[in-house]
Every structure is written in structure tokens, then in C-alpha cells.
Amino acid sequence: MLVSALPVCVAIDFETSGYEAASACAVGMARLEDGRITDRFSSLLRPPSSRVLFTEVHGLTWPMLRDAPTFSEVWPRMAALMEGARWLLAHNAGFDRRVLHACCKAAGAERPAVPFLCTLKGARRSLPLPSRKLNCVCEYFGIPLRHHDAASDAEACAHVYLRLRERGVSDAEMRLK
């Protein structure tokens, strides 16, 4: 397969501060063009509540987030990075799509019409691993990862996508319905 035959994609990862989908507290993005990362964006996000859950997972606390920009403030940069993308990529894309759509709704922003591909779905179809969590897939492929750091997770997802495509996994097989 020719790498240049790949469409423009943007990998995206969110960390959340609560159970509500609109509780994003960090975002990471990596834009793929011609099979290589051409642009990156990441930011902490001020969540809608000062009560921050999941610190044991992502390491983020309210003192770290209280002065961060809101989703509304970073949305223009995020939307610009997605411009012209054929797909958004995420590992466990149902989660990240839900968070993105809820944050857009809460911010009064139009949610992107770009469909999602799920690298978890692709990994489940093609990798002989007991777990297809992002950290396990990255270890299998030798992809560096600081797990639950949104920027690192997004970049790793982009690399996983490329490796899955090299293994013959099609976009149709990873498409999130």
C-alpha cells in the first residue's frame, strides 16, 4: 500500500474530569497527511466543575486545571486542525466522539461532521493480544507512549492507525457506526 494513498486524518484524545461527557479536562490532537504527522495540538481544559475525578488515571487536579482555557476558547484551533480531514481517529472512538460532541453542544459550537475511525476496533480485528488497550497495542508495535497524557495518546493513536493500515486493516473495518 502506498502511504500517500492514505487520506488526511486527525487523531484525537480526551481526558475527562467526571462522568459527564462534557467534562473534558485535556485534549490532544495529531494531524496525519501522506502518512506522517504534520501538525499537533494539545491543551489542558478548564472543566465545568472544580470536582476533578480520575486523577489517579490522568494525574490532573483542579489546581492544574482552574486557569486552563475552556473548550470554547480552544475550539477554533481544534476545528482548524480538523479542516479537510476525511476521518477523525481515536482508540476507543465511541468515548472520544461522545466527549467531542458533548463539549461542542455545551459550548454552542457546531460539532464536526467528520466521521470517526476506531483503532481499538482495528486492533481487535487484527492483533493477537490478550488486551487491545492503547498501552498494550503501543508496546506490541514499539510505539512510545505516556499513557493518559492526551497529546501522547493522540500521537500514539495516529501511529497505531498507520501500523494497522500496513497490516491490511481497512478504514471500513475501523469505521465507527
Image (cartoon, rainbow, N blue to C red):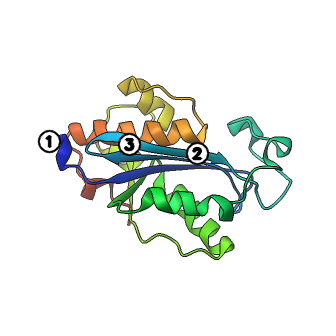
What is the crowding at mark 3: few (fewer than 14 residues within 10 Å), some, or many (at least 20)? few
Asked if labels 3 and 2 touch by Cβ distance under 8 angstroms, the answer is no
The Cα atoms of the two marked residues, 2 and 3, are separated by 14 Å
Q: Amino acid at mark 2?
A: Ser
SS category of the residue bearing label 2: strand
- Residue occupying image coordinates x 74% and y 55%: 18
The Cα atoms of the two marked residues, 1 and 2, are separated by 29 Å
From what the image shows, is residue 20 above or below residue 54? below
**Residue 138 seen by the camera:** yes
Q: Amino acid at mark 3?
A: Thr
- Residue occupying image coordinates x 50% and y 63%: 79
Q: Nearer the viewer, residue 22 or 137?
A: 22
The Cα atoms of the two marked residues, 3 and 1, are separated by 18 Å
Identify the residue under disc 3: 38
Asked if labels 2 and 1 touch by Cβ distance under 8 angstroms, the answer is no
What is the crowding at mark 1: few (fewer than 14 residues within 10 Å), some, or many (at least 20)? few
Q: Where does residue 121 sit, x and y in percent of width and height? A: 37, 49
Q: Nearer the viewer, mark 1 or mark 2?
A: 2
Q: Nearer the viewer, mark 3 or mark 1?
A: 3
Q: Nearer the viewer, residue 71 or 48?
A: 71
Tell which circle, 3 or 1, labels the residue nearer the N-terminal end: 1
SS category of the residue bearing label 3: strand
- Residue occupying image coordinates x 52% and y 72%: 111
Identify the residue under disc 2: 42
Q: Which mark is residue 2?
A: 1
